[in-house]
Amino acid sequence: MAGLRAGRVWVDHGQLVDGIDVRLTAATGHRGATLGGRLRVRRGQRLTLQVTVTTSARPNYHGELPARVPRRPARAAAARAW
């Protein structure tokens, strides 16, 4: 329950995702935060949000299995800097 209250949770009702990792990092330094965490930065500082989704390796109750997407280099992945 503490994890729920702190916001460190994600929910998958379709059993199509085995894992998700959400990280927000400052462009300068090694500081970072995951779901429910805090990241202190200065106004105007560049940030990078990276979301990594691991699809299920086995079919769900209805026999559905998410399509595999080839992994791209990290720079071409779904990361965006602000």
Image: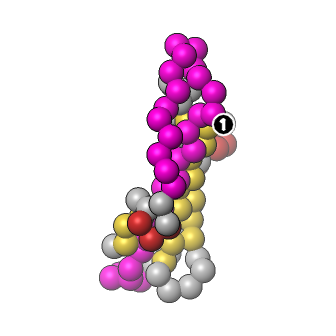
Above-or-below relation of 62 to 58: above
Residue projecting furthest to the bottom: 28
Residue 43 sits in quarter:
bottom left
**Image position of 45 (left or right of 19):** left
Of residues 7 and 57, the one nearer the viewer is 57
- Residue 2: x and y in percent read 66, 42
Q: Name the residue under label 1.
A: 1
Q: Which residue is drawn at 57% across and 44% down?
A: 54
Q: Residue at x 37, y 72 (%)?
A: 81
Element type at marker 1?
Answer: loop
Above-or-below relation of 68 to 37: above
Q: In the rendered image, which quarter contains the C terminus?
A: bottom left
Q: Residues within 10 Å of mark 1 (few under 14, many from 20)?
A: few
- Residue 74: x and y in percent read 50, 67
Q: In the rendered image, which quarter contains the N terminus?
A: top right
Above-or-below relation of 19 to 38: above
Rendering colour mode: secondary structure
Q: Does the magenta stretch include residue 69?
A: yes
Please identify the dominant SS of the magenta region. loop
- Residue 26: x and y in percent read 48, 77
The span shown in magenta is 42-71
Going by the numbered disc 1, the residue's amino acid type is Met
Above-or-below relation of 51 to 19: below
- Residue 12: x and y in percent read 52, 31
